[in-house]
Image (cartoon, rainbow, N blue to C red):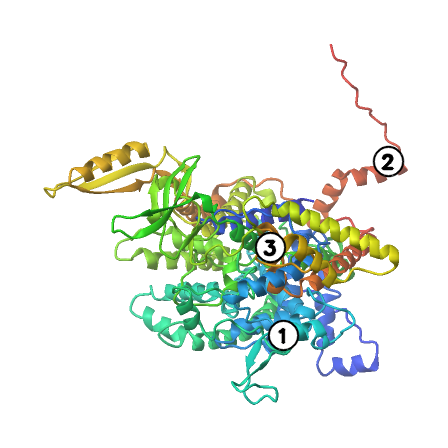
């Protein structure tokens, strides 16, 4: 923390020499060894360290993959398979990189939701939060670019869809589109620039991560109570060894899940169509992004209506980017003085609703929007016909046999007739997606601003160490320790005799 | 605990989202009875089956389907169907040399090239494709392009181990019973074939387009060919490949299964007799018995060298297993490295848990 005095004491000659020239060891010591950290951080707070590991894993495996990868439309697909088949342990490196992208996003979503729940975006951590949003945006760009590189069917057609979004921007849309593609369509030149950018962006992420940690270390960590550190001695512990060991434990548990996917289910998080070499002439039946982008894809598709002069496509794009942009201004949208939702009984429920909404949006993004969730009645059959006089008509039937008989009659009478399905009215995934999109924006733009002014917070502790003391006295373990020194009267639960 | 629960719920929701992603018109393929031997953390490929599967691929599929990403040497690398630990370099494996040499590669300056410029393939060569390019392949197959089989099992299903193999297995077996395919002449006087559906709500007739074959497991849409309730169109679609595998069949009244059973019994007896004498039954002698008692009376699509009965089910199972290996030839290494890694991480997690408990023991938190 900024107010924290450096306790680094150079011991060896080299350390003293270095400290008077470039105090980098002092920086590391003050940041990661004797950094005062609130003592009440729970496991949700380990995801920062987990994410750092994810980034390192992705960069190391990625650099090795780039040594063997060929960024041309003719060879990219085969070169990825060559890595899987002929490069020593190439299968492992590639599986780690491929699964790693998903694990990275899994961790970042947990990290973001943690920040939302404990109010980690509020003053004095607004810049920290915004830097995190920039990292998230860069991650999405990197993942999208990387998904293009194996040059499978989803790579190509996914890229077409996403780049096509820019085409919705008025006036300059098409120019931006061809600038991104490097030509009139997604082709070799697109693949090469995507590869180049996919190599560049992770290092930009690494740069912003350094800023993110810097911005974290100025105000210090938030904590589950949301109450700022008041007494460094009572409220905090040094980062090492207390949080190094806690983070290390969490990292290993996370790696266990990671390894399970790498070794036993390497392809389950991807899409099978990406093992079909890209073919511009064949469009896959369902173009879907990777799972971690599905909620945003659902928001994009939820907008099916024009508003004034803005057409649905552009609105969808605005909504999708808006869903991310709104995160940037969140520190000024949430008006509550209380950081942690632990002490915000109403906001807490809205928050859990928001988590559910995001998960369901993911489901909507993966599903055909026209699929019914709750149908009203059953599908009917419509026979439309044009009789010999040119008059048109139609009739609706429940049963196929009746519809078929009617059609035959019409045909026998010299009319042309055809049968089609009249879908029953239903609540579809589109409707669900629209509802959830509305909730997504309402959460940030209406609920948090209004609730912060109206909600009565409950039971915020005076300080971190007081809250820790309170909660540890409630724990059975603490009771037990007490009873060892001073045996308390044991109250046996009395069984109520049945009458 | 809440963390774990939340993670599980999150993963569950994610996987739910994924399963929902690929809903299509094709019938969901069901795993063969008992699943696949390579599934699960301790799973292993059935190498005998994969070897037979290679034979099916070579003798049946390879006449149309390439496997461009594979080399002959791959067949004898560790974790591959023909791996032999005596040959650490798979290129030295005589079996693979023989397998490769059956194919011809255009290499006009090679010392062993013939007058047309072709030489026998070497283990280091890629599998020789049946057609020189896509255009030729399409021309030879009525406009349809037989897909490359290198990663076909990874390109189908939802990414679970065995999804692709299950798809291949079910597709091969999934063609309608020939007895159900009827012939007629349509209004324009052109002969056509159709299939009568009479189960559940899917009642009607499905006309097969010329040169196309219905298969419920083939992704597609059969509604344009369907004469029946449009709300209950049969699963799947059409593909240009006719059913390729047939059960062993003999003359009227010949029970091939029984003949095979008897022949295998004779093989077993012969083996026992020779073992008692201290020698063994050679592969050639075994095949001679099978030839005499079984293959002389029953025509089979593939003659398995290990004596297995070449039913459609068996051949489909074997070729699916082989293609599953081919799609991910390092899968045996993957699974065998997985378990020690998981155990190592688990032990490390336990140690770190106790370290954590010890370091924090004096701090209320």
In the picture of the structure, the residue carrying the numbered disc 3 is: B315
Q: Position of residue A81 (x, y in %)?
A: 58, 70
Q: What residue is drawn where x is 43% and y is 52%?
A: A298
Q: Is residue A404 left or right of residue B247?
A: left
Quadrant of the image occupied by residue A457: top right
Q: Is residue A251 visible?
A: no
Nearest to viewer (mark 1 / mark 2) = 1
Mark positioned earlier in the residue sequence (3 or 1):
1
Looking at the image, is B230 positioned above or below residue A209?
Answer: above
Q: Position of residue B125 (x, y in %)?
A: 60, 77
Q: Are marks 1 and 2 in contact (CB under 8 Å)?
A: no
Nearest to viewer (mark 3 / mark 2) = 3
Looking at the image, is A296 positioned above or below residue B178?
Answer: below
Q: Position of residue B259 (x, y in %)?
A: 65, 48
Q: Tell me the element at label 3.
A: helix
Q: Tell me the element at label 2.
A: helix
Q: What residue is drawn where x is 55% and y is 56%?
A: A121
How packed mark 3 is, by other alpha carbons closer than 10 Å (few <14, some 14-19, many 20 or more), is many
Instruction: State how far apart marks 3 and 2 are (Cα).
Output: 71 Å
Name the residue nearer the viewer: A174 or A186: A186
Quadrant of the image occupied by residue A467: top right
Q: Which mark is residue B100?
A: 1
Chain of the residue under label 2: A
Name the residue nearer the viewer: A206 or B330: B330
How packed mark 1 is, by other alpha carbons closer than 10 Å (few <14, some 14-19, many 20 or more), is many
Q: Which mark is residue A483?
A: 2
Q: Is residue A452 visible?
A: yes
Instruction: State how far apart marks 1 and 2 are (Cα).
Output: 79 Å
Name the image quarter holding the C terminus of chain A: top right
Chain of the residue under label 1: B
């Amino acid at each position: 923390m900024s107010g924290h005095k450096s306790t680094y004491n150079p011991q060896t000659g080299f350390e003293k020499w270095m400290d008077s020239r470039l105090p980098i060891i002092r920086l590391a010591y003050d940041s990661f060894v004797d950094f005062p950290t609130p003592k009440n951080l729970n496991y949700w707070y380990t995801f920062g360290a987990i994410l750092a590991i994810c980034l390192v894993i992705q960069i190391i495996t990625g650099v090795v993959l780039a040594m063997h990868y060929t960024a041309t439309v003719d060879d990219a697909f085969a070169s990825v398979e060559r890595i899987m088949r002929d490069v020593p342990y190439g299968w492992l490196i590639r599986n780690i990189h491929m699964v790693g992208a998903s694990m990275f996003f899994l961790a970042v979503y947990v990290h973001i939701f943690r920040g939302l729940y404990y109010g980690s975006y509020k003053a004095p951590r607004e810049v920290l939060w915004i830097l995190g949003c920039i990292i998230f945006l860069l991650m999405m760009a990197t993942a999208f670019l990387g998904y293009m590189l194996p040059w499978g069917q989803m790579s190509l057609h996914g890229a077409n869809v996403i780049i096509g979004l820019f085409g919705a921007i008025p006036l300059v849309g098409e120019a931006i589109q061809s600038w991104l593609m490097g030509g009139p369509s997604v082709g070799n030149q697109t693949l090469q620039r995507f590869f180049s950018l996919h190599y560049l962006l992770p290092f930009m992420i690494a740069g912003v991560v350094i800023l993110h940690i810097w911005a974290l270390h100025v105000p210090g960590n938030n904590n589950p109570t949301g109450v700022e550190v008041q007494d460094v001695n009572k409220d905090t512990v040094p980062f090492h060894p207390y949080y190094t060991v806690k983070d290390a434990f969490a990292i290993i548990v996370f790696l266990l899940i990671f390894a399970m996917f790498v070794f036993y289910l390497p392809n389950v998080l991807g899409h099978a169509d990406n093992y079909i070499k890209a073919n511009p002439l064949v469009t896959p039946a369902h173009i879907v992004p990777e799972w971690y982008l599905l909620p945003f894809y659902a928001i994009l598709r939820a907008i099916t209506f024009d508003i004034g002069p803005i057409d649905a496509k552009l609105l969808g794009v605005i909504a999708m980017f808006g869903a991310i942009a709104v995160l940037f201004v969140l520190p000024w949208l949430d008006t509550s003085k209380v950081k942690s939702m632990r002490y915000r009984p109403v906001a807490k429920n809205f928050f859990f609703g928001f988590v559910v909404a995001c998960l369901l949006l993911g489901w909507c993004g993966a599903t055909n929007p026209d699929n019914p969730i709750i149908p009203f009645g059953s599908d009917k059959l419509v026979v439309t016909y044009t009789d010999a006089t040119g008059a048109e008509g139609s009739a609706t039937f429940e049963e196929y046999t009746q519809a078929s008989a009617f059609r035959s009659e019409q045909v026998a009478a010299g009319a042309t007739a055809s049968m089609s399905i009249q879908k029953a009215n239903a609540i579809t995934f589109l409707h669900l997606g629209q509802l959830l999109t509305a909730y997504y924006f309402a959460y940030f733009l209406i609920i948090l601003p209004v609730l912060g002014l109206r909600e009565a917070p409950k039971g915020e502790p005076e300080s971190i160490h007081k809250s820790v003391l309170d909660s540890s006295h409630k724990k059975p373990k603490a009771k037990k320790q007490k009873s060892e020194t001073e045996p308390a009267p044991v109250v046996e639960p009395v069984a109520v005799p049945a009458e | 605990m809440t963390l774990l629960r939340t993670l599980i719920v999150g993963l569950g929701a994610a996987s739910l989202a994924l399963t929902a992603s690929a809903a299509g018109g094709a019938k969901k393929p069901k795993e063969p009875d008992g699943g696949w031997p390579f599934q699960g953390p301790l799973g292993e490929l059935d190498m005998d089956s994969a070897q037979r599967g290679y034979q099916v691929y070579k003798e049946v599929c390879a006449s149309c389907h390439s496997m461009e990403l594979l080399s002959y040497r791959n067949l004898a690398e560790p974790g591959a169907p023909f791996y032999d630990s005596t040959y650490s370099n798979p290129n030295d494996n005589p079996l693979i040399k023989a397998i490769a040499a059956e194919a011809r590669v255009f290499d006009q300056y090679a010392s062993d090239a013939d007058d047309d410029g072709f030489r026998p393939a070497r283990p280091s060569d890629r599998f020789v494709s049946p057609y020189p390019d896509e255009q030729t392949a399409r021309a030879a197959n009525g406009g349809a392009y037989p897909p490359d089989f290198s990663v076909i099992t990874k390109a189908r299903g939802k990414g679970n181990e065995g999804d692709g193999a299950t798809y291949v297995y079910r597709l091969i077996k999934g063609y309608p019973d020939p007895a159900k395919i009827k012939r007629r002449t349509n209004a324009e006087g052109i002969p056509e074939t159709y299939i009568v559906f009479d189960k559940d709500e899917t009642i009607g007739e499905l006309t097969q387009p010329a040169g196309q074959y219905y298969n419920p497991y083939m992704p597609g849409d059969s509604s344009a060919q369907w004469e029946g309730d449009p709300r209950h169109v049969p699963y799947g679609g059409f593909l240009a490949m006719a059913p390729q595998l047939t059960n062993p069949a003999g003359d009227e009244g010949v029970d091939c299964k029984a003949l095979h059973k008897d022949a295998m019994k004779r093989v077993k007896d012969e083996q026992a007799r020779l073992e008692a004498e201290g020698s063994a039954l050679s592969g050639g002698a075994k095949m001679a018995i099978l030839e005499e008692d079984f293959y002389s009376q029953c025509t089979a699509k593939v003659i398995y060298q290990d004596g297995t009965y070449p039913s459609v089910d068996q051949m489909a199972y074997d070729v699916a297993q082989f293609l599953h290996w081919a799609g991910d030839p390092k899968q045996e290494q993957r699974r065998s490295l997985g378990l020690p890694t998981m155990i190592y991480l688990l032990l490390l997690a336990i140690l770190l848990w106790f370290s954590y408990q010890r370091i924090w023991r004096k701090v209320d938190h």
